[in-house]
Amino acid sequence: MNSKINISINGIPRQVEKGLTILDAAQEAGIIIPTLCYHKDLCIAGNCRVCVVELLGQKRLSAACATPCEEGMDIRTNSLHVRNSRKHIIELLLSEHRAECTSCYKNGNCELQKLASDYKIMTQDFIPLVKNNKYTIDDFSPSILKDDSKCIRCQRCVRTCAELQGVNALTVAHKGDKMKISTFIEKSMTDVVCTNCGQCIIHCPTGALVERNYIEEVWDVLANPKLHVVVQTAPAVRVGLGEELGLPTGTRVTGKMVEALKRLGFDSVLDTDFSADLTIVEEGTELLDRLKKKLVEKDDSVKLPMATSCSPGWIKYVEHLYPECMENLSSCKSPQQMFGALVKTYYAKSRKLDANKIISVSVMPCTAKKFEASRPEMRDSGFVDVDYVLTTRELAIMIKQAGIDFGKLPDSKFDRLMGESSGAAVIFGATGGVMEAALRTVYELITGREVPFEKLNITPVRGIEGVREASIRIENPIQEWEFLNGVELKCAVAHGLVNAKKLMEQVRAGNSPYHFIEVMACPGGCLGGGGQPIPTNPEIRKKRMEAIYAEDEAMTIRKSHENPEVLLLYRDFLGKPLGELSHRLLHTHYTPRNRY
């Protein structure tokens, strides 16, 4: 059957796949049609009408994003009628938009601002309505700022929260000129079921939703000579930062990033990957401990499957919607928080520093990390374990403010003591990475042999499918783990909370077939996090993922339990995995939260 149809775009005949939208057909033809409500990650809405085109023979203009091509269709994307309509739509949006562009956080990366520039909206034919509307700014969350005066009601945030995350923290309220994007009974975002994942931020076309930034606070502590400022950087940052600074998507910039941080004035530039390796040792040991208690000691109080605890958005999701399953979560803190607790204890002791004078800064791909650092449980060092969390975007701003030509920087190495890491830690940045890193270690601890996958690449847990499954059969284990002989260790990986729900419904019902589950709140894992460069889409996430795995394969050490600095940490400070000091500094508990 012929799946091609004939159409004409601006007088040029074309053959396109049947079912393709006019927007996609135009993109294939090299024709740019502006959009605002459209996003590759989301369902079609067609409510902004910026993408209107003219179909010869029809009186009304059609939304290109929502109109499929039909045989013989004659499309005009640049007629006078189309251009005037688009311009008027943009003017109407601007009439209700607080256009303080030069002082807006999204200045230079705002889709509405770009359209106003492209269409040269020099005058305003419509009455400005900003002064007449009582807009609100919600700045109570430690992660997200919501400014209604900059909202264009495209509903991308609403669809993101519903379709990608299944949380529905944001919704459409009221009708007509009273319509707005709101929350449950218009509460602050800090008081509703919001996971702080930031996906609404990276899908918002304007400055209506942005991260709460701590740039000036970090500049202040860097300028204080009495303070010792330490910075840690997450694995996904090194494959995203370059995009914000003019390099191609997916460029690995680890060495340049380290050099830039040193030039910004940080006293010690260290690696969250170090504590990612530590997380694997602790979490892997915890999994084995649970398996032993469940299968050998027949302890029914032990909960399986055990779920990873690295993603703070995922943790808050469970606390809100599955509080009865909190015991299934690993008690391990995230790598960020393990690192923070150790900076003000182990690092301070080793460097003979006063922990009161240490400021701990982290650079993360994740807005939920800002909330995580503010949790009252995260003070086991005797101080606030992590003082400030910057996103990848915030670090890029600081580099620009400092006048650093990022592309010309030489490569530098992380400082020693909590700066060494393995390839297993690097892949924490991609969905499936924590699972793969854990299996590399756990299988070897059980059997004394490497995982039976070529070059340690556990491909079944890799990919972009919403939920993925893998199993490894345990054969000929060492004597301590003889009870696992013949056991098929069953694992599952999910990314995006709408997919996590599928796994958690099984856990709640008591019929989950798995021993171990990994969940990352954001699509693609941390590399698609709410603090990463904007825009994001499936193609961009794929390139970042390829960069993550390339970084892993380039590492000399590729298993967490072989990291020499982690071994030194246990020898000189912690003692052993799951030991008394490890439990105090590296493990935590969770808090049931409201469901509304």
Image: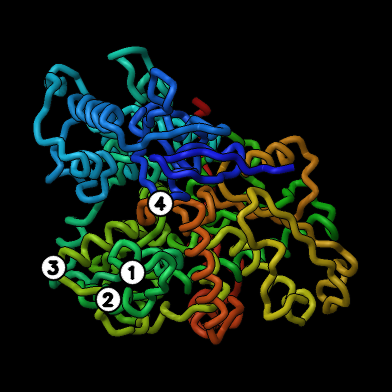
Indicate the quadrant where residue 408 lies. Answer: bottom left
Q: What element does badge 1 sit on?
A: loop
User: Dot 4 surroundings within 10 Å: few (below 14), some, or many (20 or more)?
Assistant: few
How far across and how far down the image is residue 133, in percent? 18, 18
Q: Which residue is painted at 34% across and 68% down in the image?
A: 242
Q: Amino acid at mark 3?
A: Asn
The residues bearing labels 3 and 2 have C-alpha atoms spaced at a distance of 28 Å
Residue 224's label in the rendered image is: 3
Which residue is labeled 1 in the image?
247
- The mark closer to the camera, 3 or 1, is 1
The disc label shown at residue 407, or none: 2
Please tell me whether mark 2 sits on a helix, a strand or a loop. Answer: helix
User: Is 501 left, or right, of 538 in this rendering?
Assistant: right
Label 4 near label 1: C-beta < 8 Å? no
Distance from the alpha carbon under mark 3 to that under mark 1: 32 Å
Mark 3 element type: loop
Image depth: mark 1 or mark 4 in front: 4
Q: Is residue 503 above or below residue 97?
A: below
Of the residues under marks 1 and 4, which one precedes in the sequence? 4
Q: Using a 10 Å C-alpha cutoff, classify the residue at mark 1 as few (fewer than 14 neighbours), some (14 to 19) or many (20 or more).
A: some
Q: Which mark is residue 30?
A: 4
* N-term-proximal mark, 2 vs 4: 4
Which numbered disc flags the more N-terminal residue, 3 or 1?
3
